Image: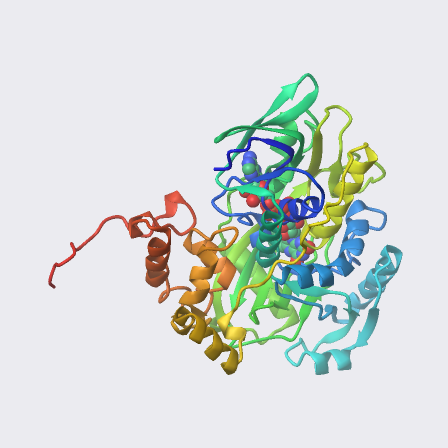
Amino acid sequence: MNKNRNFDFIIIGGGVIGCILARTLSRYTARILLIEKESDIGSGTSAANTAIVHPGYDAVPGSLKAKLNVAANPMWDDLAGELQFAFSRRGDYVVAVGSDELARLDELLERGKLNGVPGMHIVSAEEMRSREPNINPAVSGAIWATSGGICDPFGVTVAAAENAIMNGVAILRETVFEDFLWSGKQIIGVKTNRGDFTGRWVINAAGLFSDAVMHKAGIHPEFSITPRKGEYFVLDRTEFSVNNVLFPVPSEISKGILVTTTVHGNTILGPNAQNIDDKENKENTQSGMDEVFEGARKLVPNIHSRHIIAIFAGLRAGGNAACLTPGSDYKHDFLIEIPGEVQGFVNLGGIESPGLTAAPAIATYVVALLKDVGEDLHERKDWNPIRPARPQFRHLTHAERDALIKKDERYGRVVCRCENVTEGEIVAEIHSPLPALTYDAIKRRTWLGTGRCQGGFDMPRVTEILARELGVSPLEISKKNGASKFLCRPTKEEGDVE
Ligand SMILES: Cc1cc2nc3c(=O)[nH]c(=O)nc-3n(C[C@H](O)[C@H](O)[C@H](O)COP(=O)(O)OP(=O)(O)OC[C@H]3O[C@@H](n4cnc5c(N)ncnc54)[C@H](O)[C@@H]3O)c2cc1C
């Protein structure tokens, strides 16, 4: 636990928004604390989404969403270069099937132009069939947006958090915001399950729970987040793949069910869009999965259920921000403000898609808002933007593997056979700037356990390695938090003979 309890900025929420904001603010001379309620950062919406860096043709022209999406898109090359996470700018397609959908492509092209999206082209049906051999033969045309990209959303979140830590930011996990500390109308800190922390500014980046945080600040009682569930299938990359990101023509409330490749080479199908009440409900449903499968097969008919190796779901933090964001009358817009009613509070809400894409521009926007209200931010001369990536065995050449194993033999012991992840990589994550302390934390950082066997072989080994490196009993090791321990009691004493 960090002994220092006085900060300039306290950020509530360690998703992609909070972590990129922490890293952006670490460029200035300021004491910064980020608190995250879960056992790891990036455990909320930032871990379960489609992972697309959107060009910006989808957002309503004039909205804050559109502006920040288009501003953020070109920032991703530098971000990925500096933080060394997986990112590929391969463009994306919006695919029309049948002649009726062709008119929607023109509308999207027009919207893209209004939003200032560069590099959008119409591709003929014939060209589309040659670029994506598995596409529905009834394809009638497509938009190719060259600035689209795919990333590892957890990768960017953890890399930003690590770089923030390298630059002096304190990150406390399992630390739950409970209420504000006040001096009159000035917020002067937060109360948490680990005691109080004071801060000149408190920043709400609590995602799905951002409405509850702003209500504690006494503002926008009419603002609420309605979780909108999106469900996915993951396909075995050795069985089936597409080359790129394939969107259908969008609906009023969603970009539709995609078929897309990922930076890990798997194809994913989804998401659907279903409003629900429970902010913790990430269960997959039969009806939802049927909807996703049918939707995906409209774009790529020869996907088969035997290709599926995993399912997951994420929750969009859809807000009713109508009229709350100055200058925007778009009811699903991002809400990003320094409200006048209270002092010392930066408020972010309704950061649904394309929040991942927009994250670097959102951080820059918050810095601009702070400067506008007179916050004196001084750039540090010693700020280091580079977060070095750690070696990933499966991406190395034979010569590089040999050299690594000579230095550390643990890189010669493969723990996850499907994804070729070694003991050396697991140990490196446990001792990284933001240590991986659970199975899921290791899985998200190394991609172990995500192949055909879904962790069946590696789980006991990872449990053993975690216990050894952390100096605790294997009984203490959990999947994602204290409530999800793998082992409940020893079945044999040491020295027992079978
Ligand atoms: C199905 C789906 C598909 C999507 N696809 C895309 C896409 O392809 N491209 C794109 O750009 N965007 C996409 N998005 C949107 C994107 O994922 C989100 O906009 C982004 O992840 C939001 O990040 P966040 O940091 O605001 O929220 P989160 O990642 O949810 O982070 C908020 C954090 O705050 C923490 N927290 C909450 N309450 C407290 C508290 N009281 N104390 C301490 N911590 C607290 C939470 O535990 C959480 O970790 C998608 C979203 C979904 C659900």
Among the 4 quarters of the image, the one containing residue 414: bottom left
Looking at this view, name the residue that lies furthest to the front: 381
Residue 488 falls left or right of residue 134: left
Determine the residue positioned at 69% across, 38% down. 348
Residue 4 position within the rendered picture, expressed as x and y whole percent measured from the top left = 55, 33
Residue 272 position within the rendered picture, expressed as x and y whole percent measured from the top left = 61, 56
Residue 159 falls left or right of residue 490: right
Residue 454 position within the rendered picture, expressed as x and y whole percent measured from the top left = 42, 65
Q: Quadrant of the C terminus?
A: bottom left
Looking at this view, name the residue that lies furthest to the top: 184
Among the 4 quarters of the image, the one containing residue 77: bottom right
Which of 365/431 is in front?
A: 431
Determine the residue positioned at 55% across, 47% down. 44
Above or below, 344 relative to 61: above
Which of 406/292 is in front?
A: 406
Above or below, 497 relative to 377: below
Above or below, 479 relative to 152: above
Question: Which color scheme does this rendered protein use?
Answer: rainbow
Which of 186/152 is in front?
A: 186
Taking the image as drawn, is residue 276 in sight? no
Number of numbered discs visible in the structure rendering: 0
Determine the residue positioned at 33% across, 52% down. 486
Residue 470 position within the rendered picture, expressed as x and y whole percent measured from the top left = 37, 51
Taking the image as drawn, is residue 379 in sight? yes
Determine the residue positioned at 72% across, 68% down. 92
Above or below, 37 relative to 217: below
